[in-house]
């Protein structure tokens, strides 16, 4: 089309508008789209012009949304909805779409369609919901931890007295050992939950340039301090990280991130197996793949595995991976996890490389 000379000024102005704007005829055929629309949907103008609006609106439960919106706009002269639109590269995204009846020229009518991407807004809403949830959860945990620790302290004191009163090492001592083990487990769970909530509430990244070999070494040392006996029969295979640029981040946080993942892997292997750590650099990101051949994770657990208090283990509060995921996102990175029951788990951490240090390193070479 499609844009006549009389509408040249109109199209010139639309090209300067950042929002996505399309012009369609009464049947929904796309006559024009501005640069903002082409960028948003990821399709070329040549591809979209002349095609029906429906190519951008996937049907829902068999309902032709494009036809529905056009009928409503034709009847009411305007129509606005929040729907899901189709894009070439991202698949789909939430959006607010408005159709307004317009005169396109002599004896020519149609609709001006404006589209606003709601992806960032939805993400912000989700973060606000998470923040409110964490605030409420924090208040609840503060009360519960206080109520748990007081009776636990009393029980621990009476166990100590009972041990002193019972001379022989009979079954009663065994029962007391079991009680103490469960008390320790309860205290560790409460501490883990408090640590996670403290991290979420008060987290601040203090970025420095962190060398990967040093980071992985510190993370493995941290994991060993908790699971030394379980690592005795675990074979560790670490690929050479030489030549991989440093990452930009908080050294302490990143050690916790990798330490939590390694600890989960060691626990999944139940004391024996192979733990592989493979780092590489690609597209400005430093990737670290951590693979174990442990028991794996059931498919129904995978979608929520990074949520707090979700765990595939028999014990623990399910905080380790949630903490790792939070730290990765706070550093502008992400974590991917693949797992099959009985085959093991692969966790891939991707973090931004420290560009400044990388450039200086290349200059010295």
Image (cartoon, rainbow, N blue to C red):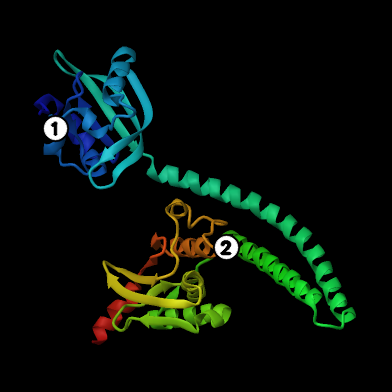
Residue 18 x/y as whole percent: 28, 41
Quadrant (top left, top right, bottom left, bottom right) of the N terminus: top left
Judged left or right of residue 105, residue 131 is right
Please tell me which residue lies in front, 206 or 102.
Answer: 206
- Mark 2 or mark 1: which is in front? 2
Q: Quadrant of the C terminus?
A: bottom left
Q: Residue most toward the bottom? A: 365
Q: Position of residue 358 (x, y in %)?
A: 30, 77
- Within 10 Å of disc 2 (Cα), the crowding (few <14, some 14-19, many 20+) is few
Residue of label 1: 49
Q: Is residue 22 left or right of residue 305?
A: left
Residue positioned most to the front: 170
Tag 2 residue: 314
Give the camera-side residue of 183 and 308.
183
* 164 w.r.t. 19: above or below: below
The residues bearing labels 2 and 1 have C-alpha atoms spaced at a distance of 57 Å
Tell me if residue 227 can be seen.
yes
Query: In the image, what residue occupies the spot 31% across and 18% down?
Result: 73
Q: Give residue 186's position: percent from left, percent from top.
A: 69, 65
Identify the mark nearer the N-term, 2 or 1: 1
């Amino acid at each position: 089309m499609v844009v006549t000379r009389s509408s040249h000024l109109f199209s010139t102005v639309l090209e300067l508008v950042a929002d996505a704007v399309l012009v369609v005829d009464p049947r929904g055929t796309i006559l024009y789209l501005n640069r903002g629309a082409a960028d948003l949907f990821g399709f070329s103008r040549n591809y979209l012009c002349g095609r029906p609006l429906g190519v951008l609106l996937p049907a829902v439960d068999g309902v032709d949304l494009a036809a529905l919106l056009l009928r409503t706009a034709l009847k009411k002269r305007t129509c606005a909805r929040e729907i899901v639109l189709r894009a070439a590269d991202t698949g789909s995204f939430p959006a607010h779409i408005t159709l307004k009846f317009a005169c396109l020229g002599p004896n020519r009518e149609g609709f001006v369609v404006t589209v606003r991407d709601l992806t960032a807004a939805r993400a912000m809403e989700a973060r606000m919901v998470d923040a409110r949830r964490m605030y409420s959860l924090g208040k609840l945990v503060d009360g519960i931890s206080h109520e748990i620790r007081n009776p636990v302290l009393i029980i621990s004191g009476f166990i100590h007295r009972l041990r002193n009163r019972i001379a022989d090492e009979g079954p009663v001592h065994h029962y007391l050992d079991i009680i103490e083990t469960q008390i320790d487990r309860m205290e560790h769970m409460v501490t883990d939950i408090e640590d996670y909530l403290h991290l979420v509430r008060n987290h601040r990244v203090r970025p420095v340039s962190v060398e990967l070999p040093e980071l992985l070494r510190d993370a493995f040392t941290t994991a060993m301090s908790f699971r030394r006996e379980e690592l005795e029969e675990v074979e560790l295979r670490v690929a050479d990280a030489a030549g991989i640029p440093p990452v930009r981040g908080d050294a302490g946080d990143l050690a916790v991130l990798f330490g939590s993942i390694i600890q989960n892997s060691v626990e999944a292997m139940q004391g024996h197996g192979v733990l592989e750590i493979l780092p590489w650099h690609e597209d400005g990101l430093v990737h670290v793949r951590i693979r174990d051949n442990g028991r794996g994770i059931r498919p129904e657990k995978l979608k929520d595995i990074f949520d707090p208090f979700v765990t595939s283990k028999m014990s623990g509060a399910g905080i380790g991976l949630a903490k790792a995921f939070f730290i990765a996102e706070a550093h502008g990175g992400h974590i991917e996890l693949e797992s099959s029951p009985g085959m093991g788990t692969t966790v891939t951490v991707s973090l931004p490389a420290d560009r400044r240090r990388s450039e200086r390193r290349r200059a010295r070479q």
